[in-house]
DNA sequence: CTACGTCGGAACGCAACCGTTTCGTCGTGC
DNA sequence: GCACGACGAAACGGTTGCGTTCCGACGTAG
């Protein structure tokens, strides 16, 4: 009977370690040290660093996100951006996501887990928004869905993760309105 | 008198090693091995892994990019996207850029070098495009420039680096037209 | 109350890389 | 044509993490 409090301590330590040093530099020894447990406790639960991280990413993926439904494309986008920007500005997420994303380019298993998390998160929500807008006639029904998702998700990700500049007041609103205009032009 | 051919072999090896294992896992020993030189040859030129990479990134940054000038916002964007997508689809760039970008979240010196490269590359070009469009009256002169740059650069980066799905025929054209529409709505 | 399994801790041998030093070779500049 | 210096190779002692094993302590299920 594995102790749940120990398991939880390890999970937290992995998140912190991942944010602090990144996947590549992260070590089982470091995780156990940070969690205040023995290496044995970690190896008893997961076979390797990879299994550990895949497990955590999958756990997050299943959480899912609430689908906005304000009745208008721009309103839905605005709501999506509120939620997304809050998540991305969280220091832990802001460090871990680009790190794992870079790692995914090198490791197919991580890539798959990230894709799945993406699909069940941001990606799925954005897709719902586009379809609702199409049903209302706000955008063409035969638009390129993948392109639409890129237009929706790209700018905020770029700003929050790559440029990393603070978002001025009114930014999300203008972003939602400009993106809606772009989608309607498709 | 350091031999230039050795220096060049090391530079190439760094790029390859960076793409293959990433900044965190990259070692001086590995670089020397791949370049077919002694460790001494590397240490004689650069003090550490960090100096080496900063030097390479800076060298790329100064290259700069040609500023498109087709006479229309959409045309300029289209041209920018052609160049950018070709660069991002290059396997080496596609691996190295997200890796260093993730590393930048952890290392201020790398962050600064990347920001500079960004400013003198993609960023600067996009800025020129927006200003030309404003001068022609295609977009408002008082738009939020940072937001405009996010709208321009975000979607393609997201698609090419995060989603990593092939770009279908006509994608760049539609992307340019939708982005232009978004910018005009600002 | 006993027996089993998890706990943290310590040590194992092994591998990789650190940054430095020493070596003998080779090539170039003066 | 000689001397200087860069070259590749090898070895240095030290650090870190690997994955495993053993230990005695604790706690809980039966």
Image (cartoon, coloured by chain):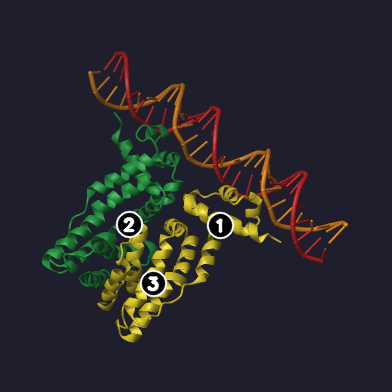
Chain colours: A green, B yellow, C red, D orange
The one nearer the camera, B109 or A53, is A53
Q: Which mark is residue B165?
A: 2
The quarter holding residue A7 reads top left
> In percent of the image, x 43 and y 74: which residue is there?
B124
Quadrant (top left, top right, bottom left, bottom right) of the N terminus of chain B: bottom right
Q: Which mark is residue B12?
A: 1
> In percent of the image, x 42 and y 34: which residue is there?
A39
**Pointer 1 chain:** B
Element type where label 2 sits in the image: loop
* Dot 1 or dot 3, earlier in sequence: 1
Expressed as whole percent of the image width and height from the top left, the position of residue B157 reads 36, 63
> In percent of the image, x 42 and y 70: which residue is there?
B122
The one nearer the camera, C13 or B127, is B127
| Above or below, B150 relative to B51 | below
- Classify mark 1: residues with Cα within 10 Å, few (<14), some (14-19) or many (20+): some
| Above or below, A174 relative to C22 | below
| Above or below, B45 relative to A56 | below
**Pointer 3 chain:** B
Distance, label 1 to label 2, CA atoms, is 28 Å
Query: Are the residues tagged 1 and 2 within 8 Å (C-beta)?
Result: no
Q: Which mark is residue B80?
A: 3
Count of marks placed on residues: 3
> In percent of the image, x 56 and y 54: which residue is there?
B13
- Classify mark 3: residues with Cα within 10 Å, few (<14), some (14-19) or many (20+): many
Quadrant (top left, top right, bottom left, bottom right) of the C terminus of chain B: bottom left
Expressed as whole percent of the image width and height from the top left, the position of residue A36 reads 40, 38
**Pointer 2 chain:** B
For the residues beneath circles 1 and 3, the answer to whether they share a chain is: yes
Residue A126 visible in the shown view = yes
Distance, label 3 to label 2, CA atoms, is 19 Å
Classify residue C3 as left or right of residue B122: left
The quarter holding residue B87 reads bottom left
């Amino acid at each position: 009977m594995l102790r749940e409090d120990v398991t939880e301590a390890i999970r937290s330590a992995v998140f912190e370690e991942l944010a602090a040093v990144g996947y590549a530099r992260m070590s089982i020894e470091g995780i156990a040290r940070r969690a205040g447990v023995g290496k044995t406790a970690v190896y008893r639960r997961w076979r390797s660093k990879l299994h550990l991280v895949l497990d955590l990413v999958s756990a997050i993926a299943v959480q899912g996100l609430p689908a906005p439904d304000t009745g208008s494309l721009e309103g839905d986008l605005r709501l999506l951006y509120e939620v997304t920007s809050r998540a991305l500005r969280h220091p832990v997420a802001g460090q871990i996501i680009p790190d794992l994303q870079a790692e995914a380019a090198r490791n197919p298993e991580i890539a798959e887990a990230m894709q799945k998390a993406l699909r069940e998160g941001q990606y799925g929500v954005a897709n719902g928004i586009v379809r609702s807008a199409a049903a209302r006639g706000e955008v063409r029904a035969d638009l390129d869905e993948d392109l639409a998702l890129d237009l929706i998700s790209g700018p905020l990700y770029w700003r929050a993760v790559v440029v990393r500049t603070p978002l001025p007041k009114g930014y999300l609103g203008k972003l939602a309105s400009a993106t809606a205009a772009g989608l309607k032009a498709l």
